[in-house]
């Protein structure tokens, strides 16, 4: 009986770990998409004359930092 409970506990822990991993992946993907959107908005504002090259550069650096940490998987459809 104890081994059954131990196996069930291990399986539940593996499921929780997989769930956490998936949640982390989804959060990283959302953050990457948000940074990409911000870069596009900064570039658009710069091209229209209402933004600055510094803002575009900062958005690009934030995106590159995110990619270095989390990879570029969010860029693929």
Image (spheres, rainbow, N blue to C red):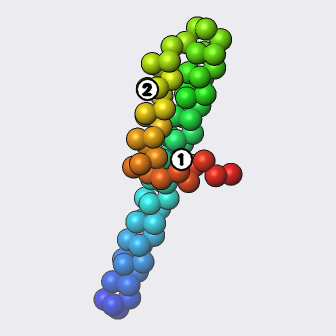
Mark 2 surroundings: few (<14), some (14-19) or many (≥20) residues within 10 A: some
Q: Which mark is residue 19?
A: none
Q: Position of residue 35 (x, y in %)?
A: 52, 34
Q: Secondary structure at mark 2?
A: helix
The answer to which of 16 and 76 lies nearer the viewer is 76
The reply to whether dot 1 and dot 2 touch (C-beta < 8 Å) is no
Residue 7 sits in quarter:
bottom left
Closer to the eye: label 1 or 2? 2
Q: Is residue 26 visible?
A: no
Q: In this picture, is 73 found above or below 35?
A: below
Residue, x 46% and y 66% (percent of image)? 18
Residue extending farthest to the top is 50
**Image height check: is 49 above or below 17?**
above
In the picture as drawn, the residue positioned furthest to the right comes out as: 77
At which x and y percent is residue 74?
57, 49
Q: Which residue is mark 2?
A: 58
Q: Marks 1 and 2, Cα distance to the nearest angstrom?
A: 19 Å
Identify residue for label 1: 29
Instruction: Decide if residue 9 is on the left or right side of residue 49.
Output: left
> In which quadrant of the rendered image does the N terminus lie?
bottom left
**Neighbours of disc 1 within 10 Å: few (<14), some (14-19), many (20+):** some
Which numbered disc, 1 or 2, marks the residue that appears first in the sequence? 1
Q: Is residue 44 left or right of residue 64?
A: right
Q: Secondary structure at mark 1?
A: helix
Residue at 45% from the left image edge and 18% from the top image edge: 54
**Residue beneath the point at 51% across and 13% down:** 52
Say which of 39 and 20 sits in front: 39
Q: What residue is rendered at 61% in x and 28% in y?
A: 40
Q: Note whether 7 is above or below 48 in the view shown.
A: below
Please provide percent x and percent y for residue 66. Answer: 43, 43
Q: In this rendering, does residue 58 appear at all?
A: yes
């Amino acid at each position: 009986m104890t081994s059954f409970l131990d196996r069930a506990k291990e399986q539940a822990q593996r499921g929780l770990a997989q769930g956490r991993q998936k949640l982390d992946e989804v959060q990283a993907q959302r953050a990457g998409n948000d940074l990409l959107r911000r870069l596009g908005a900064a570039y658009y504002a710069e091209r229209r004359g209402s933004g600055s090259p510094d803002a575009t550069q900062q958005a690009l650096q934030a995106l590159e930092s995110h990619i270095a940490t989390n990879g570029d998987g969010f860029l693929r459809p």
